[in-house]
Image (tube, rainbow, N blue to C red):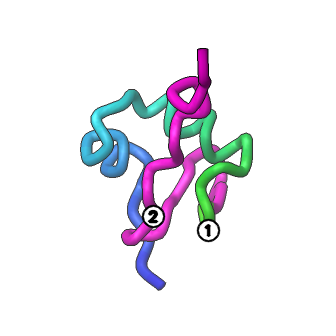
Amino acid sequence: MDFVPSSVKAKEWGISQRRVAILCKEGRVNGAELVGNRWFLPTDAVKPEDPRKNRKS
């Protein structure tokens, strides 16, 4: 499996690198690994859905 740093996925997903790190820490990105102090994600990782957008009024 190939991995890319969180900065690459942040640009791909259109969110900040810090937000990607938070998603990884919460376990919402499957296959993410912490190496030292950097998160590495699989190249085929998908952006987790935002649970706030599923709220029904």
Are the residues at dot 2 and dot 1 in contact (C-beta closer than 8 Å)? yes
Sequence order check: which comes first, mark 2 or mark 1? 1
Q: Please report the residue visible at 39 percent of the width from the left and 28 percent of the height from the top.
A: 16
Residue closest to the eye, 43 or 55: 55
Q: Is residue 36 magenta?
A: yes
Judge whether 44 appears above or below 11 on screen: below
Three-letter amino acid code at the position of disc 1:
Gly
| Residue ID at (63%, 58%) | 35
Could you say which quadrant of the image residue 2 lies in? bottom left
Q: Which residue is mark 2?
A: 45
Place of residue 36 in the rendered image (x, y in percent of width and height, measured from the top left) = 65, 52
Give how far across and how far down residue 41 sits, in percent. Answer: 49, 61
Q: How many other residues sit within 10 Å of disc 2, few (<14), some (14-19) or many (≥20)?
A: some
- Nearest the eye: 18 or 46: 46
User: In the structure shown, which secondary structural element does the residue marked by tag 2 occupy?
Assistant: loop
Image check: 5 left or right of 40?
A: left
Q: Quadrant of the C terminus?
A: top right
Picture layout, residue 17 above or below residue 25? above
**Taking 27 as reference, is 14 above or below it?**
above
Please state which of residues 42 and 57 is positioned toward the viewer in this rendering.
57
**Which span of residues is magenta-colored?**
33-57
Rendered residue at 44%/59% (across/down):
46
Residue 3, disc: none
Q: Which residue is mark 1?
A: 31
Q: In the picture shown, does residue 54 fall above or below 5?
A: above
Q: Secondary structure at mark 1?
A: loop
